[in-house]
Each structure stands twice: as C-alpha cells, then as structure tokens.
Amino acid sequence: MTFKNTDYALALLSGVLLILIFPQGNIKEFAWISLVPLLFAVQGKKTYKGFLLGSFAGFVFNLGLVYWVTVSMTTYGKLPMILSVLVLILFALYLSLFVSLPVCCSCYVEEKQGIEIAHTLPFFWIASEQVRSWFLTGFPWENLGYSQFAVLPVIQIADITGVYGVSFLLVMVNCAIYSLLVSLIYKRAISYQKMAVAFMLLGISLGYGWVRLSSLKQDQGAAIKVALIQGNIPQDVKWDPAFLDETMKIYSRLTMETAPQKPNLIIWPEAATPFYFQSEKAYQGQVAALLSKTEAHLLLGSPAWERTADGMQYFNSAFLVSPDGRIQGRYDKIHLVPYGEYVPLKRFFPFIEKLVEGIGDFSSGRETAVLHFPGGAFGTLICYEIIFPDLVRRFAKNGAMFLVNITNDAWFGRTAAPYQHLSMAVLRAVENRRPVVRAANTGISALIDADGSILQSTNLFTPAAITGIIFKRTVKTFYTEYGDVFALLCIGISLLLLMRPVLIFLKNS
C-alpha cells in the first residue's frame, strides 16, 4: 500500500469510527479516538491535501450517518430510488465540508505558522459546528458532542457551553492522544505540559458534571404529571380522509388509558389531528368530551391557517386545549424543514416543486410563544426544531419551565434517525436545565430529566401511552441566558489564527 493510499485508509477509518459513535452504533467510547487516524493522515500535509482527506473522512461519516434520507424521499417524497441516492450523495458531500474545513484550516495554520494541528483543531472544529447550525437555514445534526448523550457526567458542562463544549472536549482529547502517539512512534520527547492541560480540562469538566448531578434536585420546583400519547398512525394513511375517524378513536382510546393516573397535561404528537383543528367544530366537540373525562389540558399537533392581506397562510402548529375544550394557545413552527415543509427558491426554480411531490407549503411562525396552563409554562418544539440549541434556549429564557417536543418520525422508517433525533433532545434538557417531554407519532416518545437522564421511553412503531412526573424549573443556566458564547469565542480564536500573519505584518509595518 502506498503512502497516499495509507492516508486515505486512515481517513476512511476515522469516517467509520464517527459513524459508530452515534445511534444505532452507540459505541460512544470511540468518540475519544475517532479523529486520531485522520490526524495521522493529515500530519505534515499541505492545506489542499488536508482538505481532500478531511472531505473523504467527512463524506464517509455523513453517508453512514444520514443514509435514512433516502427512505423519506422515496417512500413519501415520491422520488425514484436512483435520484434519492444521488441526493444523499450530494447531501453527504455538502456536510463533509464541516469536517474538511476545520481540518484544512488547521493544516494551513501549521503550514504557514508552524502551530501544530493538535493545538488548533478544537477551535476550528467548534467554529465549524456553530456555522453549520445556521448556514443555509442550518442542519446541526449529530454534532460530535451528541455521541455522549448517555454519559451524564461528560455532558453536564453543556449548561455553560452548550453541546459545543462537549464536542470541544472530545476533539481536545483526540488531539492529545494523537500528540502522545506521535511522540511514542517517532521517539520524540513527550510534552507532558500538553497532556496535562488536556486532561486537566477533562478532569475539571467531569468534576463539574458530578457536582451538578448531585446538586440538581435542589433547584427543582413543583411536580407535574404528563401523559404522552403515541398513536402509531402509519404515514401512508395518516392524511387519508377515510382513516380520519379511526385516527381519532386511536388517540381517544390511548388517552383514556392514562385517565386513572390523572395527568395535568396530555400530549399528542405533531400533526396528530390530520385536519384543521381550529375549523372542525365536530372534532373539537369530540376532544372536549374526551378532556371532560380526564380533567387535563391537552397539547396536540395540527395544521393551522390564517387569512392575511397576502392570501392564505398555513402553519405546522400545536394547540393547547383546556379541559372544557377551549383553545387556550397556539404555537406555530418557526424552523421549517427545507424540501419537507416548504420548497426554497420555488419562485426562481419552479421545476424543483414538480420534482418532489408531497412537499408541504407552510409558512414560518413568528414568535417563540410560551404556552401557559395551571401547571406552569412550557415551550413547544415541533419536529427537528429540537436540534437547534439557540432556538430552544429562547423558550427557556422566555419563561418556559419545561420543554415539549412533538414530532412525527414515521418518515424515517426503522432506521437510526429516530434514535439520533432523541439523542439531541437530551442535550437540550441539560443546556437549559429543563425537563423535555417528547411525544412522537411512531416513537420514540420519552421523558427526559433536567440532568439528561431518560426516565421513560417507548419502542418504535407501536401504540403507547406513558405517564410520568417531571419537575418544573425556573432557574436559568448560563447557556440559557447568554447562548453560544463559548462557540463564538472559538470562532473568534479561529479567525485570529487565520489572520495572525496579516496582523503581524500590519504591526511590523
């Protein structure tokens, strides 16, 4: 094997390891070494070679991570399989940039300034993750830190740094291990100072995690009993008018199963009612009759509409309904799924809409509306809104005492996507110290405590009704108050590293 082939084999190994650290691989321990092969591959390389090797590793990683997009595109988007695979390849190539760019930036700084890649990659990596959260509407799916969602002491630092702090720890340890191996392999002097800094920061983070885990109960408020209803309505009949009455019967039956536990709040999933709930008086009456038996408030997902001067607008919404059947509040989804709930640029490229049948045409909601009921105040995140840290924290900052995520992951079938989606909800709980309750049409529905522990969860593709107790919270974390300060600091350091030669030149001249 040539040296060049060895480099690509090492990059391939990193790509595979990165796949395995996330659900359903779940070999979370690999996260601490997953970048080491790639670091060896780019060792001493020119910037463009670092970019190519990083792109290859990133492509392999993302191809294995988001393979499930082909399921939703072929089954529900009506795209031919060959076109779906092509879209997946293009999508994975795009996402690979967020691996290749931090790697090539570190290679550039090493090439031009002599600063070792192991010293700079953590900053460039976090800068890349943060940019990915908003660039082209954003797709921050499974940042590196999410791999540790089940390792509670590691992720507690997120209430200060967000998930980005966990990612930083992982990249930093990868770099430290790489530096140690380089010293051992090439018989160089080991820089104990570098090792000490890396593992001291890791130790401080773990110590903080253990302290927070033992002290969190002191901050919790009154208990709220919630019931999560998982209707398991097949996606291929969900919007069929002939199945509408059966859908309501399923949700009514499952809801009544929770009535003996006397929940304060019952939650149905995203688009649980496949009609405009605000307009259908007959079905509103059915819901009112149901709630009169449970004496609970109900949050349900339903499409909504508004008539404006520009015509009709449609929303993917959640309605809060009182025990007497009155609509008490509504939240309209803000962060829509491109090519899932709307077609970007359709005004300029109308042919795109014809290529993808079954795409919604929703408008974005305008405010992070916190909904109130006698049990407290909560923020509602619809579907993949839960993966956007800054959006979620705005609900907590606006007074939400707990968070609700309603979703329909039936689109993805029996793939890794529902498990990946759930893993990201865990970090939202930790970042804001707010319990997260998650109702999913086909699963995974779950109760997540403020420390990130999953208290209860359901299986995929089975009807379910679970009831549990959460504790509302009002204390705001550093992350809730100030957001992505840590990530922005990493961006600032990254820019300074890239601009350092220019700054030195300007200073000298």
Image: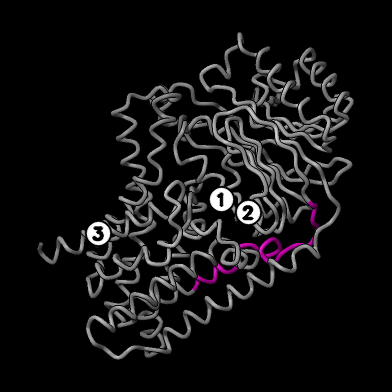
Secondary structure type for disc 2: helix
Q: Secondary structure at mark 1?
A: helix
Residue at the extreme left:
2
Q: Is residue 128 left or right of residue 202?
A: left
For the N terminus, the quadrant is bottom left
Residue receiving disc 3: 52
Identify which amino acid the numbered label 1 is placed on: Met
**N-terminal label among 3 and 1:** 3
Quadrant in the rendering for residue 438: top right
At horizontal 85% and vertical 40% (from top left) the residue drawn is: 373
What residue is shown at x 44% (from left), y 62% (from top)? 29
Task: Judge by depth and name the residue closer to the eye, 390 or 193.
Answer: 193
* Mark 2: amino acid: Arg
Q: Horizontally, is 266 left or right of 460 in the view? A: right
Residue 340 in the image: above or below residue 375 = above
Question: Distance between the Cα atoms at labels 2 and 3?
Answer: 34 Å
Residue 239: percent from the left, percent from the top? Answer: 58, 17
